[in-house]
Amino acid sequence: MNSSISGKLSSAFPLMKNYDLAVIGAGQGGLPAAFMAARLGANVALIEMHEVGGT
């Protein structure tokens, strides 16, 4: 990403961080995928609307 755009985003969203991977859903597929990616060194954002682990 262009550094000037990145700087503008950082000032507009101060809590926003950079992630290597965003996993949407912490169910039986998303949770292990996020865990494995983190174990391999990725900076992972795990996004879940309800309880972790799915139904």
Image (cartoon, rainbow, N blue to C red):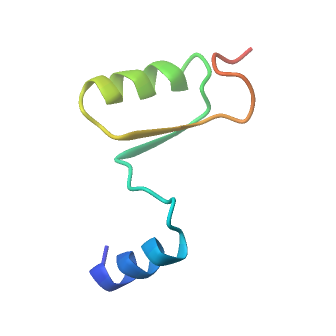
Q: Which residue is drawn at 72% across and 36% down?
A: 49
* Farthest residue, direction left: 41
Please provide percent x and percent y for residue 5. 38, 82
Number of marks: 0
Along the horizontal axis of the image, is 37 left or right of 26?
left
Q: Which quarter of the rendering shows the C terminus?
A: top right
Q: Residue at x 65, y 34 (%)?
A: 48
Q: Nearer the viewer, residue 27 or 10?
A: 10
Along the horizontal axis of the image, is 30 left or right of 19?
right
Q: Which of 34 and 16 is in front in this view?
A: 16
**From what the image shows, is residue 20 above or below residue 5?**
above
Please provide percent x and percent y for residue 37. 33, 29
Along the horizontal axis of the image, is 6 left or right of 12?
left
Please provide percent x and percent y for residue 23. 51, 38
* Farthest residue, direction bottom: 4
Along the horizontal axis of the image, is 51 left or right of 11?
right
Please provide percent x and percent y for residue 41. 24, 32
Q: Residue at x 38, y 55 (%)?
A: 18
**From what the image shows, is residue 20 above or below residue 1?**
above
Q: Which quarter of the rendering shows the N terminus?
A: bottom left
Q: Nearer the viewer, residue 19 or 12?
A: 12
Q: Residue at x 51, y 59 (%)?
A: 15
**From what the image shows, is residue 24 above or below residue 1?**
above
